Image (cartoon, rainbow, N blue to C red):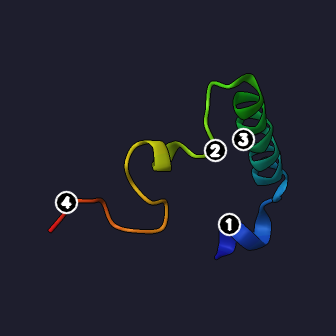
Amino acid sequence: MRFISSASFMPFVRYRIALGLAIIALVAAGALSPHAAESAGRRADGPVRGAP
């Protein structure tokens, strides 16, 4: 808790913005599909098919 109260949140903010921009760029370029879990035969919010 001491770290949170004494450190700046700017590195975290920069990291999240950079990660978001990278994901948007990959989706726009077609290298990353927003429906990748569906095409892999899995539901994004459910269990893996055939799993016990």
Earlier along the polypeptide chain: callout 2 or callout 1? 1
In front: label 2 or label 1: 2
Earlier along the polypeptide chain: callout 3 or callout 4? 3
In front: label 1 or label 3: 3
Q: Which residue is mark 4?
A: 50
Image mark for residue 3: 1
Q: CA distance from mark 3 to mark 4?
A: 33 Å
Q: Residue at x 75, y 53 (%)?
A: 12
Earlier along the polypeptide chain: callout 2 or callout 3? 3
Q: CA distance from mark 1 to mark 3?
A: 23 Å
Q: CA distance from mark 2 to mark 3?
A: 15 Å
Tell whether label 4 touches label 2 (CB within 8 Å): no
Please state which amino acid type lies under the numbered disc 4.
Answer: Gly
Please state which amino acid type lies under the numbered disc 2.
Answer: Pro
In front: label 2 or label 3: 2
Q: Position of residue 46 (x, y in %)?
A: 41, 68
Q: Which residue is mark 3?
A: 19
Label 3 secondary element: helix
Q: Which residue is mark 2?
A: 34
Tell whether label 1 touches label 2 (CB within 8 Å): no
Query: Position of 41 compared to 22: left or right?
Result: left
Tell whether label 3 touches label 2 (CB within 8 Å): no
Q: Residue at x 62, y 25 (%)?
A: 31
Please state which amino acid type lies under the numbered disc 3.
Answer: Leu
Q: Quadrant of residue 24?
A: top right
